[in-house]
Amino acid sequence: YGPQRRKMMLLGFVRLGVWRNFFRAWDRGISGNLEGEGFILGGVFVVGSGRQGILLEHREKEFGDKVNVDSVLEAARKIKPQTLASEEK
């Protein structure tokens, strides 16, 4: 999730966006579990091979902040296969 653990404490539950995300998931029938500590924000990284580095980085700003799936697929398509010749450099 990054070099520092990012948390949203109890005040995160008074944010309108958090409640909007909760009800959107509820309406779609998406359920989660109540296991774990529940305060750590997540993220999505797409990392290329070799020296390509990070091709996409998405860090949750609040609970339920979703990554754009099309952006993930676009970044994944940019991953170049690593060959033996490129490993020797």
Image (tube, grey):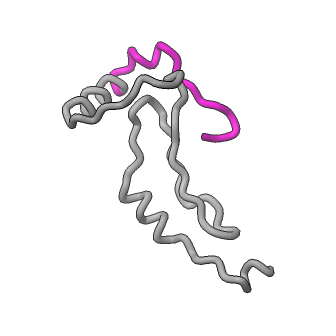
| Quadrant of image for the C terminus | bottom right
- Say which residue appears at 61% left-offset and 58% top-offset: 54
Q: Which residues are magenta?
A: 1-17
Relative image position of residue 10 (x, y in whole percent): 48, 13
Q: Left or right: 10 with respect to 5?
A: left
Residue at the farthest bottom position: 85
Q: Looking at this view, is 88 or 72 the one in front?
A: 88
Relative image position of residue 69 (x, y in whole percent): 37, 54
- Say which residue appears at 39% left-offset and 33% top-offset: 64
Residue 18, compared with residue 73, is above or below; it is above
Residue 30, compared with residue 69, is above or below; it is above
- Say which residue appears at 60% left-offset and 65% top-offset: 48
Relative image position of residue 82 (x, y in whole percent): 64, 77
| Quadrant of image for the N terminus | top right
- Say which residue appears at 30% left-offset and 32% top-offset: 31
Relative image position of residue 68 (x, y in whole percent): 38, 51
